[in-house]
Protein backbone atom coordinates (compact mmCIF):
# COMPACT_ATOMS: atom_id res chain seq x y z
CA UNK A 1 0.00 0.00 0.00
CA UNK A 2 1.23 3.53 -0.81
CA UNK A 3 2.03 5.39 2.43
CA UNK A 4 0.47 8.60 1.05
CA UNK A 5 -2.91 7.00 0.44
CA UNK A 6 -5.66 6.85 3.05
CA UNK A 7 -6.58 3.28 3.91
CA UNK A 8 -10.12 2.44 5.05
CA UNK A 9 -11.08 -0.83 6.74
CA UNK A 10 -14.51 -2.35 7.35
CA UNK A 11 -15.76 -5.75 8.50
CA UNK A 12 -18.73 -7.94 7.72
CA UNK A 13 -20.22 -11.20 6.54
CA UNK A 14 -21.63 -9.79 3.27
CA UNK A 15 -23.97 -12.70 2.62
CA UNK A 16 -27.06 -12.09 0.48
CA UNK A 17 -25.45 -8.94 -0.89
CA UNK A 18 -27.89 -6.03 -1.32
CA UNK A 19 -27.89 -2.30 -2.08
CA UNK A 20 -27.37 -1.45 1.59
CA UNK A 21 -24.05 -3.30 1.47
CA UNK A 22 -23.10 -1.52 -1.75
CA UNK A 23 -24.00 1.87 -0.24
CA UNK A 24 -21.82 1.15 2.80
CA UNK A 25 -18.89 0.01 0.65
CA UNK A 26 -19.22 3.03 -1.66
CA UNK A 27 -19.38 5.52 1.22
CA UNK A 28 -16.49 3.80 3.01
CA UNK A 29 -14.35 3.94 -0.15
CA UNK A 30 -15.16 7.64 -0.59
CA UNK A 31 -13.46 8.30 2.77
CA UNK A 32 -10.07 7.15 1.45
CA UNK A 33 -8.02 5.82 -1.43
CA UNK A 34 -8.03 2.12 -0.58
CA UNK A 35 -10.83 0.02 0.92
CA UNK A 36 -10.04 -3.22 2.71
CA UNK A 37 -12.92 -5.50 3.70
CA UNK A 38 -12.31 -8.01 6.47
CA UNK A 39 -14.74 -10.81 5.63
CA UNK A 40 -15.98 -13.21 8.30
CA UNK A 41 -14.80 -16.74 7.60
CA UNK A 42 -17.21 -19.67 7.68
CA UNK A 43 -15.58 -20.90 10.91
CA UNK A 44 -15.94 -17.50 12.57
CA UNK A 45 -19.59 -17.29 11.49
CA UNK A 46 -20.16 -20.66 13.17
CA UNK A 47 -18.63 -19.34 16.39
CA UNK A 48 -20.97 -16.32 16.16
CA UNK A 49 -23.94 -18.66 15.50
CA UNK A 50 -24.48 -16.84 12.22
CA UNK A 51 -25.68 -18.71 9.15
CA UNK A 52 -24.41 -17.64 5.74
CA UNK A 53 -25.85 -18.97 2.51
CA UNK A 54 -22.64 -18.43 0.52
CA UNK A 55 -19.26 -19.87 1.49
CA UNK A 56 -16.37 -17.60 2.44
CA UNK A 57 -14.69 -18.19 -0.92
CA UNK A 58 -17.86 -17.25 -2.84
CA UNK A 59 -18.49 -14.16 -0.68
CA UNK A 60 -14.85 -13.15 -1.19
CA UNK A 61 -15.19 -13.58 -4.97
CA UNK A 62 -18.31 -11.38 -4.98
CA UNK A 63 -16.65 -8.66 -2.87
CA UNK A 64 -13.50 -8.67 -4.99
CA UNK A 65 -15.63 -7.96 -8.07
CA UNK A 66 -17.07 -4.76 -6.55
CA UNK A 67 -15.23 -1.69 -7.81
CA UNK A 68 -15.15 0.00 -4.39
CA UNK A 69 -13.26 -2.91 -2.77
CA UNK A 70 -9.49 -3.03 -3.18
CA UNK A 71 -8.60 -5.95 -0.92
CA UNK A 72 -10.40 -8.68 1.04
CA UNK A 73 -8.84 -10.25 4.13
CA UNK A 74 -10.25 -12.96 6.41
CA UNK A 75 -11.88 -12.16 9.74
CA UNK A 76 -11.22 -15.13 12.01
CA UNK A 77 -11.97 -13.67 15.45
CA UNK A 78 -13.22 -10.62 17.34
CA UNK A 79 -9.77 -9.75 18.70
CA UNK A 80 -7.91 -9.27 15.41
CA UNK A 81 -9.05 -5.70 14.70
CA UNK A 82 -6.14 -3.88 16.36
CA UNK A 83 -3.62 -6.09 14.51
CA UNK A 84 -5.47 -5.60 11.20
CA UNK A 85 -5.40 -1.82 11.66
CA UNK A 86 -1.68 -1.80 12.45
CA UNK A 87 -0.60 -4.36 9.81
CA UNK A 88 -2.59 -2.66 7.03
CA UNK A 89 -1.67 0.90 8.09
CA UNK A 90 -5.35 1.78 8.37
CA UNK A 91 -6.31 5.45 8.67
CA UNK A 92 -10.09 5.04 9.02
CA UNK A 93 -12.13 2.19 10.48
CA UNK A 94 -15.74 2.14 9.22
CA UNK A 95 -18.81 0.26 10.42
CA UNK A 96 -22.56 0.69 10.16
CA UNK A 97 -24.16 2.78 12.89
CA UNK A 98 -25.86 -0.30 14.34
CA UNK A 99 -22.40 -0.94 15.86
CA UNK A 100 -22.05 2.62 17.22
CA UNK A 101 -19.64 2.75 20.17
CA UNK A 102 -18.54 -0.88 19.87
CA UNK A 103 -15.23 -0.09 18.19
CA UNK A 104 -14.31 3.21 19.82
CA UNK A 105 -11.27 1.47 21.35
CA UNK A 106 -9.70 1.61 17.87
CA UNK A 107 -9.58 5.44 18.03
CA UNK A 108 -6.15 5.02 19.65
CA UNK A 109 -4.91 3.66 16.30
CA UNK A 110 -7.07 5.32 13.61
CA UNK A 111 -10.21 7.37 13.03
CA UNK A 112 -13.43 5.46 13.74
CA UNK A 113 -16.49 6.29 11.63
CA UNK A 114 -19.99 4.85 11.96
CA UNK A 115 -22.03 5.28 8.79
CA UNK A 116 -25.83 5.46 8.75
CA UNK A 117 -27.45 2.24 7.61
CA UNK A 118 -29.47 2.24 4.40
CA UNK A 119 -33.11 2.29 5.47
CA UNK A 120 -35.54 -0.30 4.22
CA UNK A 121 -33.06 -3.12 3.58
CA UNK A 122 -31.06 -5.65 5.57
CA UNK A 123 -30.07 -9.28 5.25
CA UNK A 124 -32.46 -10.06 8.11
CA UNK A 125 -35.31 -8.36 6.21
CA UNK A 126 -34.51 -10.33 3.05
CA UNK A 127 -34.55 -13.61 5.00
CA UNK A 128 -37.85 -12.72 6.70
CA UNK A 129 -39.43 -11.65 3.40
CA UNK A 130 -38.35 -14.88 1.70
CA UNK A 131 -39.65 -17.03 4.55
CA UNK A 132 -42.89 -15.05 4.87
CA UNK A 133 -43.41 -14.60 1.16
CA UNK A 134 -44.03 -10.85 1.50
CA UNK A 135 -42.23 -7.88 0.00
Image: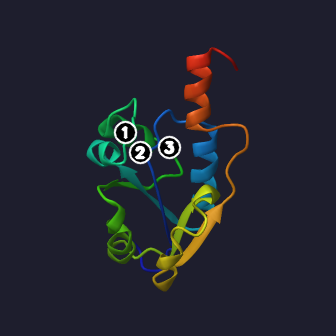
Front position in the image: 120 or 91: 120
- Look at the numbered discs 2 and 3 and tell me whether their residues touch, using CB distance below 8 Å: yes
Q: CA distance from mark 2 to mark 1?
A: 5 Å
From this viewpoint, which residue is outermost toward the bottom? 108
Expressed as whole percent of the image width and height from the top left, the position of residue 133 reads 63, 14
- For mark 2, does the 10 Å Cα neighbourhood hold few (<14), some (14 to 19), or many (20 or more) residues? some
Q: Residue at x 61, y 38 (%)?
A: 122
What residue is disc 1 on? Answer: 61
SS assignment at label 2? helix
Q: Residue at x 36, y 71 (%)?
A: 88
From this viewpoint, which residue is outermost toward the right? 119
Front position in the image: 54 or 90: 54
- Look at the numbered discs 3 and 1 and tell me whether their residues touch, using CB distance below 8 Å: no
SS assignment at label 3? loop
Expressed as whole percent of the image width and height from the top left, the position of residue 99 reads 57, 60
What residue is disc 2 on? Answer: 64
Relative to 45, 126 lies left or right: right
Expressed as whole percent of the image width and height from the top left, the position of residue 108 reads 48, 85
- Look at the numbered discs 2 and 1 and tell me whether their residues touch, using CB distance below 8 Å: yes
Work out which quarter of the rendered image holds the C terminus and state it.
top right
Amino acid sequence: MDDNKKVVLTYGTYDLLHWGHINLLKRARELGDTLIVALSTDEFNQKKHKDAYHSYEHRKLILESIRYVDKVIPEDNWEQKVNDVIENKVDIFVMGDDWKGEFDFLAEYCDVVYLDRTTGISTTKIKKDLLGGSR
